[in-house]
Amino acid sequence: MKSIFITLGSLLMVTAQANNPKPLDTIYANEHMNMALFFPSQIKQGIVGNSNFVFTYNRENQQTLGLLKAVPGKDSNLLVITDDGSIYSYIISYANNLEYPNRFITEQERIGTERQGIQKISKNVVPRETVRDSSITVKGVEDKFHKSCEALLKLPARKNIRKRDQGLSLAVKNMYTLENEVYVQFEVRNNSGVAFDFGRLEMSKVNGKKGRKSSYQELELLPLYSHNIPNNVGHGQTVRFVYVFPKFHFGKGERIMANLSENNTTRTVRLNFE
């Protein structure tokens, strides 16, 4: 922990409000939900001080969205630097339940700026987002995703990329990009003879072959929202559901790998597609 602050101190020259420092807010996270943090500017760098927290953001194509997850453990801190030179710092803590899994960060929350490339902000400029932890704002975001997911489920399938394993099949039926999100419609069909207890669906962007460790890269894509996720899928049943991810692009040789696992068993279905 100490070494992290020493390293940061050597890398950054910060213009901070030292005479009247503001107390740091606490942001809560857990392993069950993504705590989505929307910053006023694109994220250039994000660092957590403890290994039981993970902060992910798009390093290839900078975005304003960062996702925070956690497992039980000691509190830590999150430091985020945006491309306009603003610096944000928060205490981060584990919580069993998240009342609002989204937070819109305002420019007023920054603790300082990088000296290099510092930008002056006019007092007359109104921040793009002035609502913080507002149930209305969160509801608006969720309503947008809900309506789009419902519309996608009603569309005819444009894809039928399927993988079968142990009587289970996982398929991608549709994939649409809308604004800054990618909507992926999945289908699970169960002909295994026993009910499938839905566990977790993980999706990653993969480049290279796993046997060649020097060239193999795997980047997990964390969902912003999920819709119509079943608790279980009975024998003979077919269920369709949607995951919403931050917008991503395919590079040369890249593909998507989706891995569906069952709770408390070793049953999995792995699907690769482009």
Image (cartoon, helix red, strand yellow):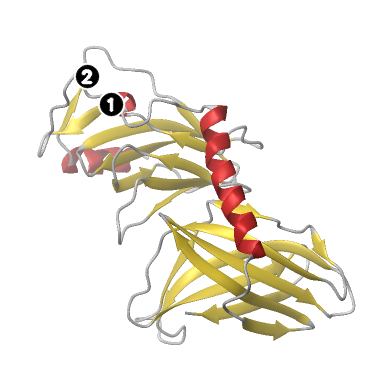
Q: Which residue is mark 1?
A: 111
The answer to whether residue 165 is left or right of residue 12 is right
The answer to whether residue 67 is left or right of residue 122 is right
Instruction: Give the amino acid at mark 2.
Output: Gln
Front in this rendered view, residue 46 or 8: 46
Front in this rendered view, residue 75 or 131: 131
Measured in 3D between alpha carbons, the distance from the residue under mark 2 to the one under mark 1, in whole angstroms, is: 7 Å
**Residues at discs 2 and 1 in contact (Cβ within 8 Å):** yes
The answer to whether residue 230 is left or right of residue 207 is right
Front in this rendered view, residue 96 or 201: 201
Q: Position of residue 89 (x, y in %)?
A: 35, 32
Instruction: Give the amino acid at mark 1.
Output: Ile
Q: Which residue is mark 2?
A: 17
Q: Element under label 1?
A: loop
Q: Position of residue 191 (x, y in %)?
A: 83, 80
Which residue is depicted at the point 45% across and 63% down?
177
Front in this rendered view, residue 175 or 219: 175
Q: Label 2 neighbourhood size at 10 Å, few (<14), some (14-19), many (20+)? A: few
